[in-house]
Amino acid sequence: MELLSTWQDWVLAAGQLSFAVALVPSILSKHKPSAWTSALTALVLTTFVVVFFTLGLLYGAITSGVVAVCWYILLFQKLFKRF
């Protein structure tokens, strides 16, 4: 497997970064999505990290991981309601 940056990798990374930025208001808000929504989305994105990495799409994998972390934060916030 060769880790080369392709245009597809850059497009996926830009899209994922857009999603991460869009989640910041939810992370900062007192209103949180459903725990099930957060958990399922985080798990699917974690799977995408592995898929993108095995395809050699390093930037897509990293940024997908960033978005997954955002969803895990939302899940944690929903479950513990302290933040």
Image (cartoon, helix red, strand yellow):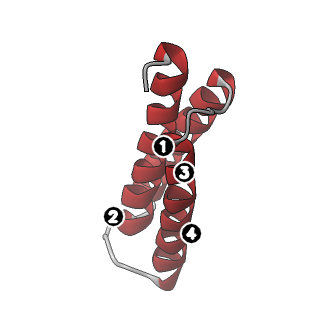
Amino acid bearing label 2: Met
As drawn, 42 above or below 80: below
| Residue that label 3 marks | 25
Label 2 or label 1, whichever lies nearer to me, is: 1
Amino acid bearing label 1: Leu
In the image, which disc is placed on residue 28? 1
In the image, which disc is placed on residue 1? 2
Alpha carbon of mark 4 to alpha carbon of mark 1: how far? 21 Å
- Which residue is found at the position 46% from the left and 15% from the top? 80
- Which residue is found at the position 44% from the left and 34% from the top? 73
Question: Do labels 1 and 3 touch, CB within 8 Å?
Answer: yes
In the image, which disc is placed on residue 15? 4
**Callout 1 environment at 10 Å: few (<14), some (14 to 19), or many (20+)?**
few
Which of the marked residues, 4 or 2, is nearer the chain's N terminus?
2
Which of the marked residues, 2 or 1, is nearer the chain's N terminus?
2
As drawn, 30 above or below 67: above
**Callout 3 environment at 10 Å: few (<14), some (14 to 19), or many (20+)?**
few
Alpha carbon of mark 3 to alpha carbon of mark 4: how far? 17 Å
Of helix, strand and loop, which one carries label 3? helix
- Which residue is found at the position 47% from the left and 57% from the top? 52
